[in-house]
Amino acid sequence: MKKTVASKALMMASAVALVAGCSKGTGSYSLLNDAEDYKQQAVFIPKQIDILWVIDNSGSMKTSQDNLAANFQSFISRFQQYNYDFHMAVTTTEAWEKQFNSASEKARIKDGAVLQTNPKIETHSGVFIMDKNTANLGDVFSTNAKQGTLGNGDERAFSSFKEALLEPQNAGFRRSEAFLAVIIVSDEEDFSSSSAAFNESYNNANLHTVQSYVDFLDGYVGSRNYSVSTITVPDDACKTSLSTDGFARKISTRLPELATLTAGVKGSLCSNFGSTLELISDSIIQLSSVFKLNREPQEDTIVITVNGVSVPNDAVNGWTYDASNLTITFHGSSVPAADANITIDFYPKSIKL
């Protein structure tokens, strides 16, 4: 058979007829046959999402903890709307202490939540892993998020989330295929280091680089199947407005740097908490709404439908294609729900013989 079936004008009916007359085993081919094979495989399954909150529990954080709890619905509403399968847990910025005292149970999470045996933790709901089936989720999160203000003033958010993720007792929180979202809420800088000594200096020889935590997450989660978002003190104006209570704060540069390196959101403790939490939730949902194609497509032939409705090629409320890694990403109002029926059809760029 002559190789004339590559024409983009090929109609569905005639192409199906060609499929019947051609056998791949004899070296013949049909572009539409590849497309039809792909359509059988192109079932979009939204990723599970594991969310770890790292909340500063030092003396200056009461107002920020209260604001976070009060605006939690702005964060969780889209996860509930789209029926996403999520795990959610809380730890503190002092969980790093465990690496220097293996007998300590200070602020590490157990099964995804703060271990209650730490006497500095003032309240806890008793729910260690929050998910879409958690009763009274808003109240549970509010209780867990209000970690109190008796924590270590040496806030090491980076090494704290690392310790929490590596703690064997927390194995029930993390799911290997899930998108991992770390969210840090702190009014201090991160000075994670290889020493237990208090040293809030950028010239500290033991200070861990920000890149080292990108490398850790790449190895622990898998390249870019995660993000780190932060809500911090970004500038002098914010620092001044928060510090009327007599507590000192620090402008953070390392925390937002990690957010930038991992495609997370950089929020301010002085901005509207509800709006910031919406941005973070939208970012997590979009980053987790990615589908990798198994063939390189002819880009202008990609057709995507959700529940039978065509989705436009649009970076705001549609889908986009990244040729560098063969991925389709959904955006905005076109992000599909967990139980949606999604099909992705295209003509492959190359031909399977």
Image (cartoon, helix red, strand yellow):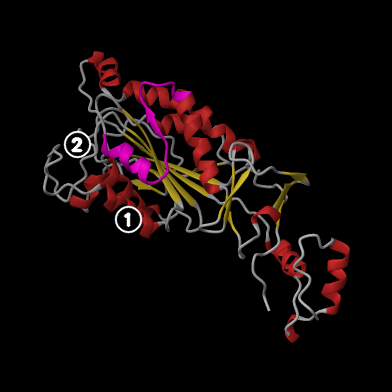
- Which numbered disc, 2 or 1, marks the residue that appears first in the sequence? 2
Q: Quadrant of the N terminus?
A: bottom right
- Residue 105 visible, this orientation: no
- Residue 245 visible, this orientation: yes
* Cα separation between marks 2 and 1: 22 Å
Q: Nearer the viewer, residue 120 or 195?
A: 195
Q: Is residue 231 left or right of residue 31?
A: left
Provide the secondary structure element on which disc 2 rests. loop
Q: Residues within 10 Å of mark 1 (few under 14, many from 20)?
A: few
Which residue appears farthest toward the bottom when viewing the image? 26
Q: Which residue is mark 1?
A: 216
Is the residue 30 above or below the residue 112 in the image?
A: below
Q: Residue 348 bears which disc, if any?
A: none
Q: Which residue is mark 2?
A: 154
Q: Is residue 194 left or right of residue 119?
A: left
Q: Amino acid at mark 1?
A: Phe
Q: Nearer the viewer, residue 266 or 79?
A: 266
Residue 17 percent location from the top left of the image? 88, 71
**Stretch of the chain drawn in magenta:** 253-274
Q: Is residue 265 magenta?
A: yes
Residue 155 percent location from the top left of the image? 23, 37
Q: Residues within 10 Å of mark 2 (few under 14, many from 20)?
A: many
